[in-house]
Structures are given as C-alpha cells and as structure tokens.
Amino acid sequence: MNQFVWSAFADEIDEDLTIQMDVLESHGIKHIEMRGVNGRNFVSYSLEEVKEIKKKLDGRGFKLSAIGSPIGKISITDDFKPHLDLFKHTIEIAAIMGCQYIRMFSFFIPADENPDRYKDEVVSRWKQFLEVAKGRGIILLHENEKGIFGDTPERCLELMKALQSERVSLIFDFANFVQCDVEVFPHAYELLKEEISYIHVKDALYENHKVVPAGEGDGKLKEVLSELAQDGYEGFLSLEPHLWGFKGFEDLEPNSPAVNLPEGDQRNFAVAVQALGNILKEIKS
C-alpha cells in the first residue's frame, strides 16, 4: 500500500454509481467509502443487490476503502436490537464486498446530559458489535462526530481503552473536532495518534463551524498529515467534502478535470481533490 491511498464519499458527487465512478476515475481515485449509492443508504440493500453493486465496481476496477455505515448513529436511549440486527446485515455486506473496514459511531447523547453517564451502555453496545464481528476479519472504525459519546479526543480514547481490542480503531475527522471546538493539533492528534487507522479529509472553521476546503479552515490538516507521514502512517485518506452550496470556485487549476464544469457537486468535489492535493504537495516539498 502507498503511504496515502485516496478514497472518497462518492455520494457527494452524485447519487448514480456510474457517475460516481466516472468522476472518481477522472481524478485517479479507485476507492470508495460507500455510504449512499443510487439514492439509497448502502446498508439498506439486500445481499443479492449488494452482489450486483460489487459486479459493477469490479467491472471498473473499484474497491471499497470502508463501508460508511450509520451504525451507532442513533440515540443511546433508542431500542438497540433493531440496530444490532442492521449491524449483522452490514457485516454480511462487508464480507461480500471484501471490505475490511466499517465506519461507525458511539451513539448520540441526550442534549444537556453528561456523556459520562452513558459510558457503560456505550461500551456494552460496542462489545456486542465486537462479538458479532468476531472471526470475520473486520475492523470497526469509530468516527468522532459531534453529539455522540466519542465526540472529544478524551472520550474517543476512553472508548478504545475500555474495549481493548485490535478489531477497533479510530477515524480521525478534522472538521468534526473543529465543530466540537477541540484543538485538532497538537492536542487531539497527539492524544490519539496510536489509535488512528483511517482519515476523513474535511476542514471547518471555529468561528461558525462551517465546512471549507481542506487547508482553508482550522483543522490543521497540513500539520497532522505531515506528522502522520513522519510517523509511518499507511492507509486511506477519505475525502468527505461537505461543500454543498459553495459558490465561486474560480481558482480551479487549469488541469483540473472539472475546470469547465458548472457550479455543483462534481465541481465542488474537484475543489476538494485539488485542496488535498495541494496540501500533500507542500508536505512532500
């Protein structure tokens, strides 16, 4: 594996899988973190339908970097059994796709309540996930997301220590930490660097929590990616642009595949690709 392997949430390009692959291919990206495909959440498909999606990906030489599942993105007070059943289905999807990673969350905490009150229940549910995944060769990736138990680096680390499993690791999401008003670098990175196996590439501003192209916010992407490179990280950089509604990207480089595209999701994705590419060029220079 190259040190940094590019992937993307292709549903931010278009709902249609063929268009997703066309655009990714134009940027030289051959991995997808599959969340939405053809207008539906990927984990809502039957196993037979998943096999057909895999055939289409195989035919174009695409692979999944991760399943961008919604597992753990419910309230900690919601009924868990239907969600555990969905996780079991997601495990079967991962097996069909030959995908090692499943992106997951640690449950939304009721507003204005202390997350520590729910730690035991969060850990209990994650241990049930691990039991279901036992022997399947799957790594469960926890994403830091605002409002869940593991939205701060401290609680992400608490969860990892409580689980003590090689089959759980962390996604590091710059923008999500910024939106929780966390110092991304050096604080969050230094605290979590031994637990990180996957990177989500998006940036945001502290002042209004708005998502912006990589390197234009407060996420310290250059610093973290530089440290990752020096620390020997080998893995995916998954673009999750979240640039919906952005206008005026007149600074696209002339060789960008999207330079002649109208404003919209495909052009926004090109901006995200260019922004990450510029950061990586700076790191290498």
Image: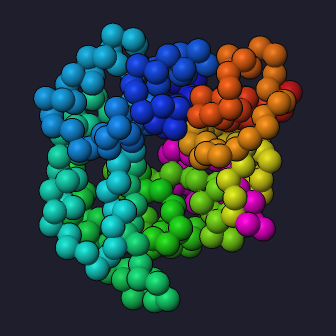
Front residue of 223 and 254: 254
- The colour scheme applied to this rendered structure is rainbow
Residue at 51% x, 63% y: name it. 145
Q: Quadrant of the C terminus?
A: top right
Identity of the residue furthest to the top in this view: 59
Front residue of 94 and 242: 242
Q: Find the magenta span and give its range.
A: 186-208
Q: Is residue 144 above or below residue 222?
A: below
Residue at 19% x, 60% y: name it. 84
Q: Is residue 270 above or below residue 42?
A: above
Task: Answer whether residue 249 is visible to the viewer in this image.
Answer: yes
Task: Answer whether residue 214 is visible to the viewer in this image.
Answer: no
Picture coordinates of residue 135, whole percent (x, y): 19, 44
Q: Is residue 68 above or below residue 149?
A: above
Determine whether, in the image, residue 3 is placed left or right of residue 120: right
Identity of the residue furthest to the front in this view: 262
Picture coordinates of residue 146, whole percent (x, y): 53, 67
Front residue of 263 and 90: 263
Determine whether, in the image, residue 71 is placed left or right of residue 212: left
Q: Is residue 188 magenta?
A: yes
Picture coordinates of residue 106, whole percent (x, y): 39, 66
Determine whether, in the image, residue 26 is placed left or right of residue 227: left
Quarter where residue 237 is shown: top right
Residue at 66% x, 29% y: name it. 267
Determine whether, in the image, residue 192 is placed left or right of residue 54: right
Residue at 75% x, 60% y: name it. 205
Picture coordinates of residue 61, whole percent (x, y): 40, 13
Q: Is residue 203 magenta?
A: yes
Front residue of 123 and 164: 123
